Image (cartoon, grey):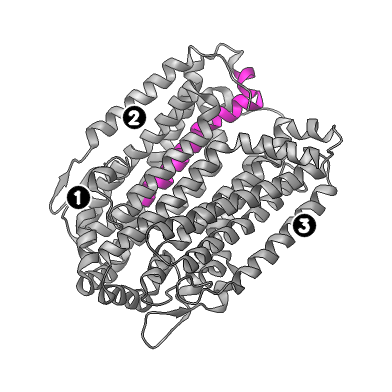
Amino acid sequence: MTGLWALLRLRTRRDAVQVSIWTLAVLLLAYGSSVGVAENFGSLEERTSLLSLAVANPVILLFRGLPSGTAEGAFIVFLVLPFLAMLAALMATFLAVRHSRADEESGRADMVAATPAGRGVPFAATVVHGIVACLLLGAAGALGLVLSGLAPAGSLVTGAAITATGLVFLGVGLVAAQLFHSARAANSLTVSLLVACFVVGGVGNALGTPDATLTRMTSSGLAWVSPFVWAENSRPFADDDLRPLLLAAAVTAALAGLALAMQASRDVGSGLLPARRAKPHAGPLLSGSVGLAWRLSAGSLIAWTLGSAVVGVLSTSLAAVVEEVGTGNASVQAILERLAAQGSMDQGLLVTFFVMVGVLAACYGVQTVQRARQEETHGTAEAALATPLARGRWLGAFLLVALLGILVITGAAVAGAGIALAATDGDASLLADALVVAAGQALAAAVFAALTALIFALAPRLTIPLSWGLVLVAACVALFGTIFGVDEDIVALSPFAAVPLPSGNGVDQNGVLWLVAAAAVGAAASVLLMRRRDLAPGG
């Protein structure tokens, strides 16, 4: 027990910043959504109209939760529970991989295994630490709803649903960490499974059965393979049914047991799946720093690009749904028009979807620049910098690859939007609007890549938690701020919301000047500062 408590204290200290950021994000999103919905959808008629529209147009259910009635609390949960649960799932998977596979890569696991703690105590510490972190996020979600004035019972069920989803993906992360020899591969698998579960749950809900009032939906059988749907079927503020969460608890226990058995059957540092054999000689691509940075990031670029293309297709293929939304609900019409700087509702929907494109591009940019930090902690940066390669050029290579990838990702979204317009005989002028918004979101994503590089140069140990935290906060403000009635001056602080916007037949420049300045100054400063600091390989 002494070894377990020592490891728990160590991991709590290591994760203090990350867990605090995740917890605060859940608290603010839960509270802000409750207050905003009360202001923007305060009447029963408005909530009924939007729920009926969602049930009649199942594509909307792909991006929201499970309708459970017109009560204010149930309506709020319908809008935000999947996103709150996704935050918990992401945190849990990253935590599981970091304290298992990543520790093996860094050599920490070897040192701990050499003590009387062995290999079992670190695994137990990871499980306990993950459970506590998921409970914190669930408590934060419940507290945010209670502070907004909602009933404690429904708020607690919402918190339990958030926690349960996080615990399932904690188990997924533990299993993935046993399969691969690198944390990068394990994280890629867990995020892919998370997104797949989210999409399958949305499709399953869309194929469900509505009630006679068109304000409540019963999930189809397909949906029940997704942990997100288990959380949604607890139906907070409507049924407050905890039974679906028992399924999450059982799956979590089974996954943790499987991960423990898999760990016992392999050596420290190895994975159950064999690593891909490397070529005996490097090709021309790896002869320079830019080629190396590209090689390290090419695989993730494919995934982000495909996701962006899908979002682009959806951004221009839902015009009929948008028209019905605006006709049936004045609040929705006002929000969509505000998003497009008082442009049309179609333009407002385009802006909303391309905010998600910007978030995807920013995630790629941040992830690519973070490769530099990973190379530094793994010791491979030292070998590269022992050559005539300058430190500024080395970091600049990762920045350049990040910016090129951002352009590819946003370009894929524009291509998807154009394909959808051609297939549906949509308004061709929307393609020009898509180009404007995509260029703006590429600029916003570049700001986050530059900020990540600047953090890496100034405070390398904060690179990963702080850069992801900035993206998370900015994305929440941009995606939910306008919908939930946040002051426009606060929303404008998010780079994703400060981009140029289509406004009727023109373009609102918005905050383009400060975005350009932030990206340019951040990138230049990071390269200059990198020349003056020593390597910091410590985790």
Quarter holding residue 108: top right
Which of discs 1 and 3 lies nearer the camera? The answer is 3
Q: Which residue is mark 1?
A: 502
Give percent across and percent down for residue 119.
82, 41
Q: CA distance from mark 2 to mark 1?
A: 22 Å
Dominant SS of magenta comes to: helix
- Determine whether, in the image, residue 91 is placed left or right of residue 211: right
Q: Is residue 153 above or below residue 533?
A: below
Q: Tag 1, which secondary structure?
A: strand
The residue sitting at 51% across, 56% down in the picture is 86
Q: CA distance from mark 1 to mark 3?
A: 52 Å
Q: Which residue is mark 2?
A: 519
Q: For label 2, count other residues whose C-alpha is less than 10 Å away and answer few (under 14), some (14-19) or many (20+).
A: many
Q: For label 3, count other residues whose C-alpha is less than 10 Å away and answer few (under 14), some (14-19) or many (20+).
A: some
| Residue 258: mark | 3
Amino acid identity at mark 3: Leu
Q: Nearer the viewer, residue 148 or 7?
A: 148
Amino acid identity at mark 2: Ala
- Determine whether, in the image, residue 264 is placed left or right of residue 485: right
Work out whether mark 1 precedes mark 3 in sequence or the reverse, and give the earlier one.
3
Q: Which residues are magenta?
A: 356-384
Work out whether mark 2 precedes mark 1 in sequence or the reverse, and give the earlier one.
1
The residue sitting at 37% across, 62% down in the picture is 149
Amino acid identity at mark 1: Pro
